[in-house]
Structures are given as C-alpha cells and as structure tokens.
Amino acid sequence: MSTPVTRRTFLAAGAATAAAGWAVPLRAQPRAIKIGVIHPVTGPLAEPGQACRLGAQMAADTINAAGGIKSLGGAKLELLLGDTQTKPDVGRAEAERVVNAGAQLLMGSFDSGSTAAMVPVAQQRRVPFLVDIAAADPITANVAKAVRDGQQKVQYVYRNFPTGSTFGRRAVQYFGEVFKEAGVSPKRLVLMYCNDLFGQNSARGFQAAHAAAKPAWDIVEVIPWPEPPQDLSTEVSRAKAARPDIIAPITRPASAQLLLPEIRKQRIEMMGIVGPGSPGLYEAGQLAVLKEDLEYVLTSVPWPNFKSPRTNAVAEDYRKRAAGKTFDTNSGYSYDGMFVIADVLERAASTEADAIVEAMKKTNYTGGLMQYGGPIAFNEIGDNANAIPTMIQILAQKPVAVWPREAALHKFVFPRPRA
Amino acid sequence: VDLTLAAQGLLSGLLFGGVYSLMAVGLSLIFGVMRVVNFAHGDMMVWGMYLAYLLAARAGVDPYLGLVVCAAALFALGLGVQRALVDRIMDAPHEMQILLMLGVALVLENAALVAFGPEPTRVRTPLAATTWYLGPLYVDVARLCTFGMAIALTALLYLFLFRTALGRSIRAAADNPYGALVIGTDVRRVYGVAFGIGAACVGAAGALVSPILPFEPATGLSLSVTSFNIVIIGGMGSLLGAFVGGLLVSVAESLGAVFLAPSLKGLVSFVLLIAILLFRPTGLLGRRPA
C-alpha cells in the first residue's frame, strides 16, 4: 500500500522545501568555503577514522579562529563531514553527496580502497582532492598517467602522505640502520600482511625495496591473511616453522589484536617484531588491549615531530578533546592536510577549481606538525616526496620516536630482552 | 609439507571448531523449528561478547563463568525478538523475513557502536595467556577450554531436546506445527523458547570466544556468514549436522592456511559450500524436505 501524493501534500512539501532553502543563505552570512572531509568513522577502521576527523576539525577551528582565509575576505572553512564506513562504494557515494552539497575541495580518506573510489568523483566533477592519508601508489599515479597520456586535462588529486613504495624504501633503509646500530645481523625475516589493497601494496613496496637494496637479510617467507581474520594461529605456526630472526607484520587494528598474542603464545625465539608501517601497533586503544604484547615492537610509521613545541601544544589540546588519546599519525596528517588546504586557498585567492590546482602545484609549506624530510611540495605525480615515516618503538607502554637519529627522542631497545 | 605444521593446523582448527559448532547449532535450531533464517545471529553473538567483556572488565568475572549470564541475557533477547517481531511474520514470504532480520541485525550492530565505540577489543584472562606443549605441538589452553565447554553445552542442548517434555514439544513443533497444535502443544510458546535457546547458544559462544577473538560492533556480519555456511554444509535444521559442520569448516580453513596461501583459507570453506550445494544439496546430515 502506498499513499498517493495529492496536489495538496505536494504543494505543502514544495513550500516547506522552498522555505528551508531560503533559510540557508540568510543564516550563512560570512562567506564559507565548503570542504568535504571524508573518513571511515564507523566500521573496522573507525578508531583511526575518528582520529582523522577530529584532527581535521581541530585544524579548521584553529584556522577559522585566526581569521579564516584572508585573501578571500576572511572566509571560514566549513567542513562537510562524510563517513566511508570503511567501504569503497560508500566512500564514492559520500564524495558525490558532499560535492552535490557544494563542497569545493575534498579531503580524505585514510583507507586506500575508499580513497581510490573517491578519485573518479574528484576528476569528473573537477573538485580538487587532497589525500590526507592513504598509501597505495596508484591513487595519484593513475591520474598522473592519464593526464600525461592526454586522456584527462587536469590532475585534481594530490597527496600529502608517504606512498607504499616510500614506506617500503624507508623501512628497508631504517631496518638496516637499526640492525647496524644495534650491532646485530639478523638473516631471516618473515613478512606477514593483511591481504587488502593497503596490505598488498605495502608488502609489494617492501619486497621491491628489499630486492633493490639487497641487504644482508632475506625475506624467507611471506604470509598474507584475509582481513579481517577470525583466527591467525596457523599463520603464526607457519611463520614459526620458517625460524625467523625478525617478524615484519603489516596489520590492521583487529588483526594486530589476534597476531601479537598468538606470536607470544607460540613462543617464537627471535630478535624482535619490526613493522614496515601499518596501523594497529601503537595506538592508545591497541595498547590498552595488547599491553605487554606490544612492548619493544618497532614500526616505521608517519609520526608527529614532537621536538617542535607547536606539535606538543596541539597534541595536548588533542588529548583533552579526544578523551586522553594521543596525537599520532592519523590525527596529525589530517591536521596538516587542513592547514595545507588553507595555505593553498590563501595563495589561490579563489575557489575556482583550476586556480586551486595551480596553487596546489606551487605549494611549499613548512608549517607541518609531522616529521617531514623537507617542506610539503607536490611532485609530478602529485605526491609529497618529503612525507616520510619515522621508526617508533613501544617503550614503557608508550610509542616513542627512535630513528632516524634527528627525529629520535629515545634510544631503541633491540634485540628485545628475553622474557 | 612440514608434518608438524600440518598436525598443528589440524589441532588448532579442531579446537577452534567448537565455537563454530555452537554458533551454528543455535542458528540451525531456530531455522529447524521456525523456518526463519536469523540474519542477526552474528550480531547477537557480538552482544554476547560485549556482555562477557563488561562482566570481566567491571566485575572481574571470568568469561567462562560469565557465559551463564550471557546465555541468560541472550535468551531473553531472543525470546523478546521472537514475541515482538518474528511472531508477526511467521507466515510471511521469505524475503520479508530476511528484511526483518537484517533490520534487527542493523539495530543490534549500531546499538553496540553507540554503547561501546568502534575500536576492536578483547577480554584478557590469565587463562588466555597460557599454553601447553605436547612435544613440538602447542595447545592453546583458552581454546581447549572453549572447545570443551562448547561440546558440553551442545550435549546439554541435546539432552534437553530429547529427554525433556519441553524439548519434545520443540521437536514436535519443528516436525509438524499443525500436528503439534492438534495434540495440544502451545506452539507460540515453543517458538519463543526455541528462538531464545538459539540466541542463548550464540550468546554463550560469544562469551567463550571473547578471550580468543578480538571483536568490534562490525564483527557480526562475518560471524553470521560463517554460521550460514556451516549450517548449509551440515544440513539446514540438523543439529548434529551443524555440530559436525562447525568442526569441519574450522579444520578445513586451518589446513587451507597450511597447504595453500593463508589468504585463500576463506576460499576453502566456500568451495566446500559450493561442492555440498552441487552434490548433496540437503547438506551432510540434512533430511530431504518432505
């Protein structure tokens, strides 16, 4: 049964819609620039996704409190928030939704699958898209190639985050440096990873970097698992059978909660767990659950530059607003992303898409809170080559930067002490 | 192939299988009695896990004791869902039943999201950190306990269904609702109790697995899918089939991770499903529909 729409109800609904429509311009008196900010706020990646959202909101609040975008008459940044639910199709639909609602820029979206799904929306609708977090190389590389081949005119997608291949290269480099500094020479490394777009891309980047660098250690076994897993005991038995000196895991939060206790239970004799870079191995929520299983775990991740007083001030503010959670990779890169957008808009002095892209290409921003290898600038692929990871370690149940030397706040402990 | 590894895979798979069995037995009971597929099964299990978590974190109750509370709470939830919702659509077409149960699943999942937040968590008990060694093989004590209790609970359910008057009414209503009504069975009451027991099984399974498996509100869907898979392999409505199917699927996945790439282990159980549907559509122990 359906209620027929009568002329009367139709007119009433139309009048109501029109009234609501009129109300908007009257309320929005100072000019606002709408920015679609899309992250996985629910679903398996909700913890990092919510951190991203809060980081972006805090940055926008700071920018607005300091007078907004001055070259646009003090226009404020207005965030249109979206949730990918950790599903690529939803990521795309959310991007469409915020663009239809008037978003002039997009930022997001943490998870490589959803981010890749948002790229066509940015390109087709001509909306500049700053990827704040997502590592899979093709996200920007495919667009750059399409522009180079003349299939598309303008690249609207830029990324301020290390790519999978950067992660791989830096991880292999840091591993070698840490082993050398510690005076040990591990021979056998087992690579374990979650078999999704992020995990596959990171594992491939790591293996390619290993093949190129030819270090003294070998990858003796590669073990992918379906994500999310319900059981990893057999995978860990396989790793144990390969007699590893090092286990290098690429995890997600839930799989890290299965993997690390299992490694402890099966009592694998080795020098330590050293991750090439992934979520799940350092966040406050993970530490609360995994406790001593995370102690001495090393991971190469994008990390805030805690040597800067500004980073520490923002981190303290974040702790208050996030119920005690620490300012880390996710909140930090989203925070920096919003400031890069503000910097780009300031220089573009326009909200026209191609003017924003021109300003984006000329970016040379040094105010980032994360540990960078130089100013934020975008190369011919649209990536920031100075976005690099830092080696961190869980020491006394806190993540601390331990390598490279210029970023280190503490000396690393490796090999890990025997239990 | 490394024989130790294969033996370890077999052992780990078998021990984990107890939980799969208990999950599937609950689903199979509900389907067998009411011909309603409980799409909220996995989400009910997640609530069992969170209750065990609350009991452990707030009151220090070990999940192996807390499972009594979890089972009782889920029994009440199941009874409530049956009385308030399922009872109204018993004779409705299947697609309407599916939509209703998916709706219940969404409500349960999002209620968990509001109540507990999105981060994955797990229950920490001293037992979960203990392992025994049998020569080169290791036995995870938490899994062993889980396995033992899952078997014991399934046996109890069997005794209940075959040795008590209420159990006999449940089986009568499952076999022939009209006949059961004619001989004076309160079929509506039986349906409510059966749904409650099915939910209690999965609530207990949730408590049992909470020290082994990390969970979050979104975990329910994959548990529901695993349960359906097992029930179809074992035979729709057959409790013994669900029990055997649970062990079989768990061992198959574990051995799949030994002999194939671990990322293909999910494939193993679904290939098993397709093979069963092609060559024995009633499932391993299912009866032909009358």
Image (cartoon, helix red, strand yellow):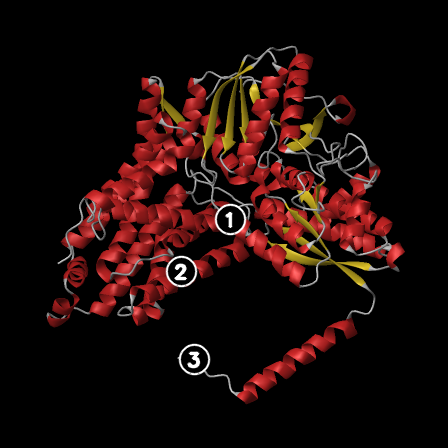
Label 3 neighbourhood size at 10 Å, few (<14), some (14-19), many (20+)? Answer: few
Q: CA gap, disc 2 to disc 3?
A: 23 Å
Question: Which residue in the rendered view is the most extreme toward the front?
Answer: A150
Q: Nearer the viewer, residue A247 or B15?
A: A247
Q: CA gap, disc 1 to disc 3?
A: 49 Å
Asked whether the residues under marks 2 and 1 belong to the same chain, the reply is yes
> Which element is circle 1 on?
helix
Q: Nearer the viewer, residue B30 or A3?
A: A3
| Quadrant (top left, top right, bottom left, bottom right) of the C terminus of chain B | bottom left
Q: Nearer the viewer, mark 2 or mark 1?
A: 2
- Residue at figure coordinates x 23%, y 41% from the top left: B244
Q: Disc 2 vs disc 3: Cβ atoms closer than 8 Å?
A: no
Residue wearing tag 3: A2
Chain ID at mark 3: A
Q: Amino acid at mark 1?
A: Arg
Q: Nearer the viewer, mark 2 or mark 3?
A: 3
Where is residue A99? Give x, y as percent.
66, 59
Asked whether the residues under marks 2 and 3 belong to the same chain, the reply is no
Residue wearing tag 1: B58
Residue wearing tag 2: B102
Q: Disc 2 vs disc 1: Cβ atoms closer than 8 Å?
A: no
Chain ID at mark 2: B
Q: Is residue A323 visible?
A: no
Q: Is residue A115 left or right of residue B93?
A: right
Label 2 neighbourhood size at 10 Å, few (<14), some (14-19), many (20+)? Answer: some
Is residue A179 positioned above or below B87 on the image?
Answer: above
Q: Amino acid at mark 2?
A: Leu
Label 1 neighbourhood size at 10 Å, few (<14), some (14-19), many (20+)? Answer: few
Where is residue B22? Give x, y as percent.
30, 46
> Which element is circle 3 on?
loop
Is residue A139 positioned above or below B83 on the image?
Answer: above
| Quadrant (top left, top right, bottom left, bottom right) of the N terminus of chain B | top left
